[in-house]
Amino acid sequence: TPAAVVLGIESSCDDTGVAVVASDGRVLGEAIATQAHVHAQWGGVVPNLARDAHAAAIDRTVDAALAAAGLEPRQLTAVAVTIGPGLGLCLRVGVAKARQLARQYGIPLVSVHHMEAHALVSRLPPAAAAAAPPAVRMAATLMTAAAAAATCESAAVAAGIDTAAVRDDISNFAAVPFPFLCLLVSGGHNLLVLVRGVGKYVQLGTTVDDALGEAYDKVARLLNLELRPHGGAALEALAREGDPGAFRFAVPMRKHATCDFSFAGLKTNTRLAIEQHLDPQRTSWMTPDQVNKLQVKADIAASFQFVAVTHLTEKTRRGVGWARELVPELRHLVVAGGVACNQVVRKSLQQLAESEGLELVLPPARWCTDNGVMVAWAGIERLAQGWAEPPPPPPPPPSLS
Ligand code: KG4
Ligand code: ZN
């Protein structure tokens, strides 16, 4: 039996993700409620609608993950929850549920940073994905909730959790040892981080404007692509039909000797190309279907992607050099976050890793976009350090006055 079984809750953006994961790396049950359909018509995530959809889905999603794991809540060792960064309204829904579970079952609460969860899920062994039951997928609908979290250390031991045994479980199977270089590319973040251990992060680079996933989403919208489940995925599919050399957009930040990223200029150049070549006045005599089949549309998509990935790879290459100055023994490059699902991104970073003598590690696609497994897993890693807070006290009795 594993030393710990943790339920993780993720609600920072537009997915309510819940999973039950054991400290020996087994994913016991997973459920996810997506709300892409709630936001698709608005062209972006609307925070108060997202909050309502999380509130309506959270109980069902927790129940579904526990049912998939065949566990009762009282069998859990701890509850982990994303406390940020993300949309405050949405984070509160997950935090309130986590606090309620911790209070009700008397188990510790582990606060997890969203990007830490994206980074650490790479340590789950590949076998975990193969053996994990399929995620229970649901559509979120609308309704409401509230609360917030503070962090304090080391309630795990007080709760009788054997943190050394949890550490043993982890060290027996972790797919990637520390330290590793991690490129995190999602809709909200574009970070290059040297991960020296749990909670020991050195940020080497970030975006000076947009994140790559955000740029993919914006260009997908300008090209009228399907935004569900992700504009990025639709853009990648269209780009497969196009010529990446058709438009020679400038590669960003070449004059900056940093590991920072920038996608706003590329996005603007892509928008200008779209306005010039897909001007509604010039295409008004065509049916929407004919417009969609225009070669120039695919060429723009492919050219945008080519330059974006070139930039991503160039800065990551410099980051490898920087990281090696701090840790010459560096052996692994991890790429995580929603954009890590992209095959062109994967291939380019695979080539980089090979030429730098590093091993590329990519979490399975289902755990690259937001999910509960990464939060549960980051919770286990933190628990192993003794970093947890005691279950919150019960609410005061109602006042008699
Ligand atoms: O990590 P994630 O689920 O949420 C955030 O934390 O932001 O990442 C979502 C982002 C979206 O911007 C989405 O367009 C992008 O990841 N994405 C992709 C692909 N699949 C998802 N971008 C490019 N190519 C893909 N195949
Ligand atoms: Zn994310």
Image (spheres, rainbow, N blue to C red):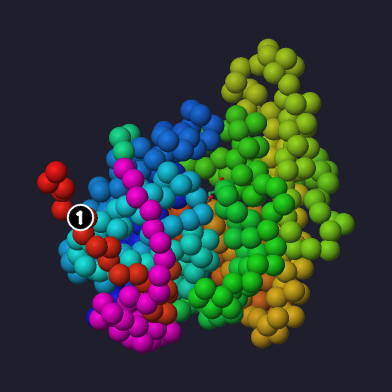
Q: Residue furthest front?
A: 401
Find disc 1 in the rendering and name its residue.
396
**Above or below for 366 versus 362:** above
x, y percentage for residue 178?
Answer: 55, 80
x, y percentage for residue 94?
Answer: 35, 52
How many numbered callouts?
1
**Residue 121 vs residue 7: left or right?**
right
Q: Residue furthest left?
A: 400
> Which residue is found at the position 54% from the left and 78% from the top?
197
> Which residue is found at the position 87% from the left and 57% from the top?
255
> Which residue is found at the position 65% from the left and 67% from the top?
203
Which residue occupies the foreground of this view, 247 or 179? 179
The answer to whether residue 398 is seen in the rendering is yes
Which residue occupies the foreground of this view, 3 or 394? 394
Residue 192 in the magenta stretch? The answer is no
Q: Which of the 4 image quadrants contains residue 126?
A: bottom left
**Above or below for 253 versus 125:** above
Instruction: Say which element carries label 1.
Output: loop
The residue stretch that appears in magenta: 145-172
Q: Residue furthest right?
A: 255
Disc 1 under 8 Å from ligand 2? The reply is: no
Q: Which of the 4 image quadrants contains residue 323?
A: bottom right
> Which residue is found at the position 60% from the left and 40% from the top?
217
**Residue 3 vs residue 82: left or right?**
left
x, y percentage for residue 233?
Answer: 55, 45
